[in-house]
Amino acid sequence: MAHPIEKILLDPAQEDSFIEALRTPSGRKYSPSLYILFSNAIDMASSELSHEAYKLVLKTWETVFSKNFDDVKLQKRFLKLKPKVIHLMMNRGDYASYTRLVRPIYNMKHLGAKSEWADVLMSTLQLSTDALGIVKANHSAIEAFLRSEKHHIDDKRLLIVTYVRKCMLHSAQSLNFDLVLSNFISFLGLVGDGNLHLTSSEHLVYESSLRLLALPYEGVSIRTHIENIERIVSQKTGNDKHSLSLFMSSLLASIAKTYPSMAHHYWSFKKDHLSTGLLSYITPEDLLNVMWAYFSEKKYETVLRVYADHPSLQRDDQIIVLLKISDKTKDWRLLQSQFEDMYGRGELPYVAHYVVVMNALASIGATSEVDKLYEQLRKRNLAPTPSIFLALIKSRLNVNDDAGARMWFDTFLQKATSGEFPGESIPKLQAEMFSMNYFKGDVGSAMQAFQEIIRQSESSQVQLIDAKIAGKMIDFASSVYATKELDAILALASRLNIVDDTVYQKAVDALMKFGQFEKAEDLLFMAHVDSVVPFSNSLITKAQIKMYRTWFKSTPDTQLRQLLAQKVTGIIKRIDRGDVSPRNKNQLLVEVIKHFVSLRKLRAARSYLEEAQRTNGLSELHFLPFFKHFSELHTYEGHAQVLELYREMVKSKVPISASSYYYLIKSLLHMDKVNNTSYENSYNLLESVFELYGFSSVDNIAGKKLPVSEIAQNSVLLLKIVSAYAVATALKKDTMDIVVKFLTQIKQKLGSHISFEFRVSILSEMSHIYHAQGDLASAEKMVDNALSELHDIIDTLHLRAVPKLLQLQYRKLVTHKIRLLRATQAGEEKYEQMLEAVCKRNIRLSGPQFSQLTIGSMQKTVTLKKLRHALAVCEKFLVSGNWIEIKINRKIQYIYKLLVVYLRRSLSADSIHQKYKLLNDYYNVRDFTQLEREFARISDPQQTLSSELAEFSRLSPPQTWTLSALLQKTPEFFVPGRQISTKNIIEPSLASVLIRAVEIYCDGDMKKAFGLYDDFPETMEYLLYFGPERARFQHFYSSLDQLAPVSTQEDVKTKRDRAVHALRHLQISTDTV
């Protein structure tokens, strides 16, 4: 679980061993691993173990570069990490350690160490932090560097940026903001940027610094923050409003697209506060940036309003935002109208406008319209860009014209390789071409295509591939459970250095799907290390929480579950402390909400939703965990909560998709049924969803066109929405017409873009619909076809262990299949075929499913083939659970005997015999004299009993048992029939059938019996144990029936509850013993 470097940081003894290994020649035999661990320690200095990691970095550096260290080769290797070490010292404001540990290296002539840019930064800035947390810097050295003519302007600007970044990110902003902003403005004046207008391309280097300065620090409102900026800038510029205006414009531009909720506060400040009377300080550039800010928040109406309200500020470069709004709102007529309105206005439309319109039309497969615009572009002698070719390619792919797409891509590639287009534009179009393979389901062909692209790229030395293509390949491999191919994709992506956050995230998701959690954890560590600021990347942290939660749900190991829970808790503490990047933090909060909802801590979960709301980052994803929770309560109140959440989303203007509508229609169906409204509300919602996604429930009326990618992305959820309605309204005359119309239209819209998941979902959902309508033959045919699809995947990939998620998908189908077999009163041959298919592919079903299939296959006849299948399943998947159960029961029996010995101190033998007769008989306690001899070695029964209960609590959580709890809840502890947490056991009904089957097959032939024992030892041993154990169990409950007769039909739980209630007179307090 823990990475090697984490173990060193958490254990002082291991840290000492690490340093000792560096000091001794014998320890340095493993120098490559020592170097890697040191590198990891540097990265970990940004994690929750930052203090320990930084101390280890300094101690290691001091050891390796001490005077008596004689391994020059290792020293030179460590020198490669010198810039990282220096930056770490800068981050800590630890100039003293730099002078003590790094500067002396330059006097070690045998190393030939040279000063680098990191040294220049450190020596010039000389950052340190005083006892109050105030950042100190060497201002004279900084000013000398900025004034010097021997330094390039780019280096000067980079020094200023570094100063701001180090001070803002690695010190208390509340204490240092005024100082840093004041110095920033002073330094800008020294390099010719004192007018404070920093939005041109040459000033792009300042963007990250401006962003840090634009965002308010913790505990300060955005309004107060802007007022502070106004005060400081005014002081530095002599109350020059023009300079203040330009600086505010620079801040607005830096956050318009990344932190849009903050950006419009700067717009409001300039418009409502800075501008007075006829004197306005807002500019066309400001209008463009605030339009982008509102656009990023999906506030399209606000964009249009703010644009219309300022006609005097309107200019041509703002039109592209208007076009993009029409694209996003799928208003194709308005898009074309806006585009046509440009004609006659100077040189409009520009190529950038063609790009937006052509790609929007391409997304809906409007090939002829795209071609017309391309011809128009050429007639106007405008040079097409790579994005124009992207539209030409995409329009073909969306109507399944692979040959046409290939022709346009080859045309583009020829121009790109001849130097007409930049080489970095190729991968984006290559990724679109690659998507042709995605829905064909042939992982082998896709891998060949992927490897061929890499070969072409390496031979031509032109980059044809990027992280986006790698991500698509990972998605594809994940969708068809191609585990080996995933490893190959990651290796190739790493070799080509195209692994980014998205690739890491997709790879971790795939590994989780395959159940390879240890590998996923290692990959997450690498992802954190590769981040700009290690261990603070919100996207990777999100993937980390998701992985630990999934792992927790997948493992039965109690200790591992506790460790995983601790890790999630630790990560959430880091989030609460603000130790993660604000970028993508709202996505991270989704996983935190899921975590607390899963723990039923809804108030805590709600606080994180409100945090997302405060930063204007609220999205549908923050509501979905609550939808799922309330929907799964299956109560009227729960479904009412779903509707309330939906109203809240509408009120907050949160965009809503099929993900929410799926839960909403389930709730409306439940309420319509309870309220007897003929499902009118549900039907109205279904009509709305159809309209939203371009479907029509009316013949000969086509729905609006949507991008094929959007339909494909939501296809499974849309199908589930239709299926939920169809199952609930199965007896309605027109229900099947709605289903058929939906399937016909979605197949037309998707063409070849039908994924494996959607294909299986169609078969599965149609099976449920046919079942609801009473057409059992069609229902069974559909579920058989769905199982066949999964068989094809499993058979093709030759998996030794079927991934957990694929098993779960298979189990759902098997549950439905068994339900149909029962409904049709199927013969045993169908059960046998199902069991054989499962055994052949090494698929792990649940215990009840194995029991039902096995019992069903032996309804009338027993054959050796059937018996061996059944015993093989039990040996491999089930019997281990039974031995855990036996271990627990034996421990309970031992504790019962101990309890009797303990009670003998205060109760007579007759009293115990009469009062505890049922339990005495079950646990074979009849001769108290013999019992006391058996426990004679125990001098303190009370202490021993307490110790045994503590051990039992660890063996069988979650309840913790003490002696006091045991005496007060004696029946609850000792009544037989307690169920362990796993369902993966040989159930009593299955054990009885197996015993009968073994007896029929062996027919007294011990040779046959021993043969089965040799092949299935654990199962056969359990069956030998089961007979007497079952007899004891049945005798207990037959005796109980005389004491407390059965009044209703019972399952195992209700039977045990009746026994606990009947024996409640055994409850005693510690005062009486």
Image: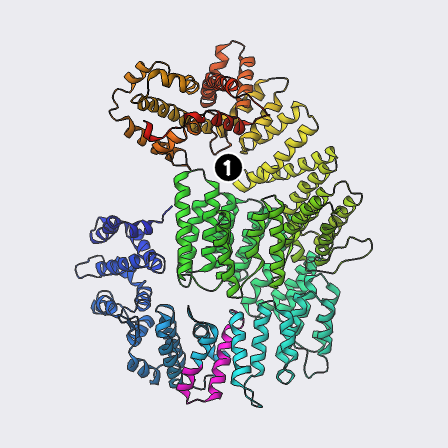
Looking at the picture, tell me which residue is in the foreground, 404 or 648: 648
In the image, what residue type sits under mark 1? Ala
Q: Position of residue 133 (x, y in %)?
A: 30, 70
Can residue 309 be seen from the camera position used here? yes
Q: Does residue 908 appear to the left or right of 719 in the view shown?
A: left
Q: For the residue carrying disc 1, how many other residues have a C-alpha within 10 Å: few (<14), some (14-19), or many (20+)?
A: some
Q: Does residue 200 appear to the left or right of 69 in the view shown?
A: right
Number of on-image labels: 1
Residue at image x 54%, y 75%? 264
> Which residue is outermost to the front?
1072
State the extent of the magenta-drawn residues as a range. 230-258
Q: Position of residue 705 (x, y in %)?
A: 73, 60
Q: In which image quadrant can residue 452 be found? A: bottom right
Quadrant including the N terminus: top left
Q: Which residue is mark 1?
A: 801
Q: Is residue 112 above or below residue 160?
A: above
Main SS, magenta residues = helix
Looking at the picture, tell me which residue is in the foreground, 986 or 68: 986
Q: Is residue 793 above or below residue 580?
A: above
Q: Is residue 665 above or below residue 89?
A: above
- Quick check: is 845 in the magenta stretch? no
Looking at the picture, tell me which residue is in the foreground, 5 or 695: 695
Q: How is the image coloured?
A: rainbow
Q: Position of residue 646 (x, y in %)?
A: 62, 56
Q: Position of residue 762 (x, y in %)?
A: 68, 44
- In terms of secondary structure, where does tag 1 sit? loop
